[in-house]
Image (tube, coloured by chain):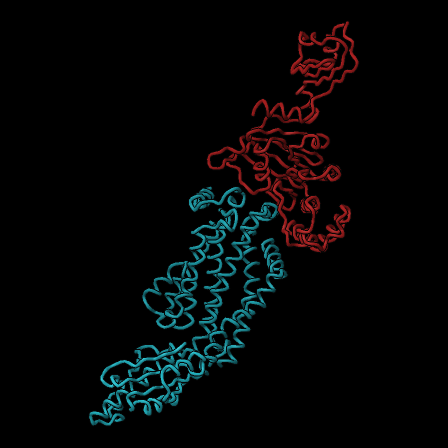
Chain colours: A red, B cyan
Amino acid sequence: MPVLEVEAVEKSFDGVRAVQGISFSVERGEILGLLGPNGAGKTTLIRMVIGIFLPDRGAVRYFFGGKPGPLQRERIGYLPEERGLHRKARVLDLLVYYAELKGIPREEARRRAREWLSRLGLSAWERRKVEALSKGMQQKVQFLAAILHEPELVILDEPFMGLDPVNQDLFQELILELKGSSAVILSSHQMNLVEGLCDRVLFIQKGREVLQGPLDEVRRSYGRYRVELRFRGDGAWLRELPGIEGLELSPGKASFSLGFGVEPREFLESLPDELEVEEISLRRPTLHEIFVDLVGGTG
Amino acid sequence: MKLLKVARWEFSQRVKSKAFLVTLFVTPFIWAIAGSIPLLVDRAVEGEERLIAVIDGTGNIFPRLSRLLEDSRIKAIGADAPLDELLDDLERKEIDGVLVLEEDLLRGGAAALYSRSLGGAWLGELRDALSRAVSAWRLQDRGYDPDEVFSLVEDVKIVSVPVGRKLPDPRAVALPLGIAILLNVGAFMAGVTLFSNIVNEKRERQAELLLSSVTVRDFLFGKIIGTGGAVFLQVAIWGALGYVVAQRAFSFPISITQLPFSKLLLSLLYFALGYLFFCALLSVFGAGMEAREGEGGAVGIVVILPMVPLWLSGLVAMEPDLGIWRLLSLIPFFTPGMMLLRLGVSQVPWWEIATTLAMLSLATILLLEFAAKVLQVGLFMYGKSASLGELLRWGIRAFKR
């Protein structure tokens, strides 16, 4: 059973339709990638899920503890895209405050906060004010505020934004850990980071769903292999080859996509016998390429 | 209750801040200094004596003038030296003025006064004494007894005795009036603090995280209670300090425990409703504001409106039951301020209390609901401050849902 089910939700602001008829669900033990360019409607969709906005149409259903029921904010963890912490508050106090608002008793909240701060290397900063922390540290604190109460549904809006590569790896590790006990919605436009984490993806553009499904299926169904080729001699023959698109040709080097439905074996058999191939690579399109392709095509 | 958790957080953050402690201790000092400056200046000035040299060309005025000035702060000395010499003395600050009385003064002419800084009260005293001395000479010259004539033309005094109401003892109304003013000031300070808090949270994007944990009502009420609690703690400390100082300095005829309990209770009720009304009003504007610097004229007016009764407090205390004050008491913007003042100094009829309480309660409930609706939208509208029209539209649209 899903933890969250969203059915055909719509939301407009002053006549501008921010979200139009989007449906999806997410289960415990699953990470759903919510992908789309800036202004696609991701944040509005998330705000409807966490009850900040009411949808104009459609429904948001919750199944916390495996039972249908109303929105329970205590069971949701949220890392907003717009980062904002009380700058004058002390780190530990702030984490305890947010955990208390999520229904965790104060002492337990303090214990958990200390444990997590230690794990993220922030123990020495627990009595410092938020304003004394670096941006990366603040991001960690905000991440902790979202998960300290062990929510059933975790929503992370652009969690990698502003992080250095080391912390990006750390966050990836933490998000994968969350998957063990929660349903996770991960909104981002950093496809390379999302790709290794998501089980399913939902692409939205201009408030509408563009593509949705399990990651492998999306990549497979999107189906256009990328080919990188190094060869000897004249490559002009590539122009005559059926079933290839987006050819970029330079002396001894070519890159292109196979047409929709063209299988690698089919393509390899179509290569002329006289071709002296030095190196060839075939791979499924990355999320980034699918994203750019979709956004480019519809935007 | 999450509301109380938000309130406790707001209260503790505010009370623990340096700004709170600085304001708590520095403000009474500023008040004490500001209050004592005029007193000190007055005392310093009062004690000063002015020395006037009088060249009496009439040969008749100086002795009486000198006698008339005996009990004043001006000391007159007769001078035989030429005017130029006396002006040199004046330049060297050995004397404060030179008064020259020519012969024609007795026939309606003017006296000349040379001085560096003899103005205001001193000049008035000197003029009165001189007028009396010259008048006395003229009367005597015509054969009258000046003292007898002056006693005959003495001013008649009128004592105003109002019918139907006793004039309040200024010291007796000072305490309830002081409480009313303090509560008004507290509500104003807390409302403005809440407004800044909401604008800051919106600008620094803190509200979104909070609203993923609590409803917008818990958010708003928690802030109102927490911010108000901290500000009123401050005001209560100042009030207690002021009360102790005033008791010792002016010895009020009644103490706070002698004030009628029902009046105190009603005052607190008006104050609480007024505070909620004011906070709700400012929250609406705070939600639409992108930055505090950008606050427009509308906010300025909203901030000023509840202060109007304070400016009128002197007039209200004198005639608390005037028609205009009754009318203002019915307008929710002014109800708390007007009623706090009127309750402090008079017996307001029960039907007026009931009507104003009912109207203020209704207006407050509606406005709080409206503020919550506007906050729900306004806190997430970034980029520019909302116009009054937009704020109204957001609220009305949310109400229709």
In the figure, is residue A50 to the left or right of B370? Answer: right
Q: Is residue A150 visible?
A: no
> Left or right: where does residue B245 sit relative to residue B138?
right
Percent x, y for residue B391? 45, 45
**Residue B206 visible at all:** yes
Is residue B190 depicted above or below B50 in this figure? above
Toward the viewer: B290 or B1?
B290
Q: Residue at x 52, y 60 (%)?
A: B190
Residue B234 locus on image (x, y percent): 56, 66
Q: Left or right of A48: which side holds B348?
A: left
Quadrant in the picture for residue A209: top right
Q: Residue at x 77, y 49 (%)?
A: A118
Q: Position of residue B111 (x, y in %)?
A: 30, 81
Q: Nearer the viewer, residue A148 or A79?
A: A79
**Residue pictured at 59% horizontal, 31% vertical:** A23
Quarter residue B309 falls in: bottom left
- Nearer the observer, A152 or A43: A43
Q: Quadrant of the N terminus of chain B?
A: bottom right
Can you say whether B19 is above or below A36 in the image?
Answer: below
